[in-house]
Image (cartoon, rainbow, N blue to C red):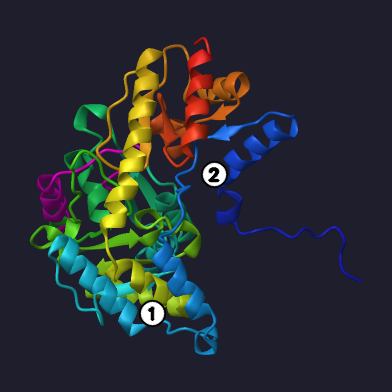
Amino acid sequence: MPDESAAIRPARRIESLPPYLFADVDRRIAEKRAAGFDVISLGIGDPDLPSPAHVVATAQEAVAEPRYHRYPDYYGRPEFRQAIARWYERRFGIELDPNGEVLPLIGSKEGIAHMPTAFVDPGDVVLVPDPGYPVYSIGTLLANGESYVMPLQAERGFLPDLNAVPEGVALRARLLWINYPNNPTAAVAPLEFFEEVVAFARRYSILVCHDNAYSEVTYDGYRAPSFLEVPGAREVGVEFHSLSKTYNMTGWRTGMVVGNPVAIEALGRVKTNVDSGIFDAVQIASITALDGDQAWVEERNVRFQTRRDAVIATLRRVGIEAPVPKASLYVWAPIPAGYSSVDFSLRILDDAAVWVTPGVGFGANGEGYFRISLTVADQRLAEALERMERVRL
C-alpha cells in the first residue's frame, strides 16, 4: 500500500515560480464579471483586429492538404526560413543565411523562454530589464540562473545604464535581454544605444538577445531599427521577432530568431528535444504574410494610432501626462499621487469596470506606472475611456 502521508512535491524552482502576470489578470476580471459587471480589459496586448485575409485564405488551403498533417521539419520548412531571410533583407537591409542564421519558433515567447536553457548553467547571471516582459526572468529561473535587474527609468528614456552593472556581475553574465520598441514602457532605442550594447557584450563575452516583436507597430512616420543593423551585432547577438503583433497573428504561434549562428544552433538543439516544430499549414501561411503586400501593416497602424491619440487625450483631461509612444501597442502612464500601481488598477476596476495593468506587474521598477493596451475595439475603447474619465481620483 502506498504511504498516504507521502506528499507529492513540485521542484523548488516551480514552488518559487509566480503565476504568469496575465493569467492572474484573467482571474481578477473573471471575478468581477461573475459579480455582474461588464468589464472592459485594457490589459493584454492581443490585437483585436483580424489576421490578414490573404494569410487566412492561404492557411485554409494548406490545412486541407494531407501532406501538411504530418510532423513538420524540426528546424522549420526551408521555404519559411528563406522567407524570413527575405523579409529581413527588405525591411532592415540585413542578409541572413537561412540555413544557419534563421530559426522558426512557436511564437517568440517559446524561444525567449528556452534561450536560458541553451546558455545558462546554475548560478550564471542573466541581465534583465525591469520593468520588462516577465518571460526574460522566468526563463532564467527555470534554468536555475540568476537574474540581475537593470532598471529602466524615465530620466534615461527607459534605456538601461550598462555602466551601472557591477564588474563582478558582468563577468558572470551569459545573456543580456533588451527590447525596443519596449514592452511595457513603449520606449524606442536609437542605433547609438545598440552600439553601446555591442561594445558591452564584446567586453564581457555576453550573448545579446533583442526582443523586437513590436518593430512593425509604429506611428507618426517612425521606423524601428533592428539591433542587427549595428556593425558587429551578429557576432554577439540574436534578434527575436514574431508574426503575432506584426500581422495580428497571436493565436497562430509563429515567430523566429535570427542572428549569431552559434546561438541559433544551440537554441535549435534545445527545441529539437522539447517540441516538434510549427504546424506546416501555419508555416505556409506565414510565408504569405512575410512575402505579401505590406501596405496592410501601415493601414492597421493607422487604426492603432487613432486609439493611441484617444487614450492620450483622455489621460490629459484627467490630469495624467503620459509620453506619446512612437511604437508598440501600449501607453505607459504615471500613477496619480497617493496610489500604488495595484491600488490604482483596482480603483479603476472597482469604479469603472475597466482593467489597466499595474506597472509593478512588470517588475519592481514598474511601480508608479500603469499600462493601457490599444488592442480593444474602437467602440469598447471609447466606452472604457469615458468610464475612466468619470472616476474621481
Around disc 1, counting alpha carbons within 10 Å, would you say few (fewer than 14), some (14 to 19), or many (20 or more)? many
Asked whether, in this view, residue 232 is left or right of residue 251, the answer is left
Give the residue at the far top of this rendering: 392
Along the viewing direction, whichever of 78 and 309 lies nearer the viewer: 309
Which amino acid lies under the numbered mark 1 shown in the image of this protein?
Gly
Q: Is residue 5 visible?
A: yes
The residue indicated by pointer 2 is 22
Task: Pinpoint residue 161: horizontal percent, then vertical percent.
Answer: 20, 38
Distance in Å between CA atoms under marks 2 and 1: 29 Å
Q: Residue at x 48, y 80 (%)?
A: 62
Identify the mark at residue 303; answer none if there is no mark. Answer: none
Task: Pinpoint residue 53: horizontal percent, then vertical percent.
Answer: 43, 63
Instruction: Find out whether the residues at labels 2 and 1 contact each other: C-beta distance under 8 Å.
Output: no
Asked whether, in this view, residue 78 is left or right of residue 6, the answer is left
Range drawn in magenta: 174-201
Asked whether, in this view, residue 303 is left or right of residue 196, the answer is right
Along the viewing direction, whichever of 66 and 208 lies nearer the viewer: 66
Quadrant position of residue 208 = bottom left
The residue indicated by pointer 1 is 76
Which amino acid lies under the numbered mark 2 shown in the image of this protein?
Phe
Asked whether, in this view, residue 334 is left or right of residue 198, the answer is right
Task: Pinpoint residue 66: horizontal percent, then vertical percent.
Answer: 55, 88
